Amino acid sequence: MKFIVFVPGNADTEAGVMPTEAELAEMTAFNERLSEAGVLLGGEGLHPTAKGARIYYGDDNPTITDGPFAESKEIVAGFWLLQAKSMDEVKEWMRQAPFKEAYVEIRQIFGVEDFGDELTPELREREEAMRAKAEDLA
């Protein structure tokens, strides 16, 4: 099963404050443990929302709003993409994340098996081809 762990942003991440060398060393050590355990598929930090945009969809043409966005507690500052046997395994890993004051949000990612018959063999084949192409780019 795949999971994504969202790391919320705060005033510092929105101001573009970069982690200290000590914080980066702790996070690198944690990421190495995830990698050595075969759990880590990816993970990245995100630039402040001032450099981002949101696209709103409705009845008319989509509208685009450039960042920054108002509520810093509703933004994402980074993420991990993990492969684990269960939500409990991911929870246990995230208990060990080197955060002092924060929280993370863990969400399971849908797999092709979750879509049932609605994902026809033709659509499944197209999905698999697209994923293989994406893996070649990585």
Image (cartoon, rainbow, N blue to C red):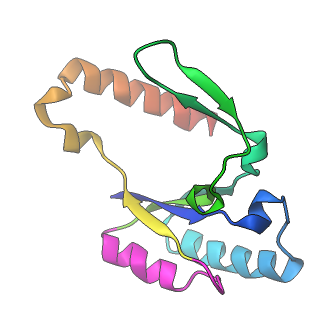
User: Which residue is found at the position 73% from the left and 82% from the top?
Assistant: 26
Q: For the N terminus, which image quadrant?
A: bottom left
Residue placed farthest to the front in the image? 70
In the displayed structure image, the side of residue 49 where residue 111 appears, left or right = left
- Which segment did they paint magenta? 85-102
Q: Residue 44, image x and y in percent? A: 66, 56
User: Which residue is found at the position 30% from the left and 23% from the top?
Assistant: 125
Residue placed farthest to the left in the image? 117
Residue placed farthest to the top in the image? 60
Q: Residue 43, image x and y in percent? A: 61, 58
Total labels drawn: 0
Nearer the observer, 125 or 57: 57
User: Which residue is found at the position 78% from the left and 41% from the top?
Assistant: 51
Q: Residue 106, image x and y in percent? A: 43, 65
User: Is residue 100 found inside the magenta-colored segment of the image?
Assistant: yes
User: Is residue 91 found inside the magenta-colored segment of the image?
Assistant: yes
Q: Residue 133, image x and y in percent? A: 52, 28
In the displayed structure image, the side of residue 137 where residue 86 appears, left or right = left
Nearer the observer, 70 or 45: 70
User: Which residue is found at the position 42% from the left and 83% from the top?
Assistant: 92
From the viewer's perspective, is residue 96 above or below residue 87?
A: below
Q: For the C terminus, which image quadrant?
A: top right
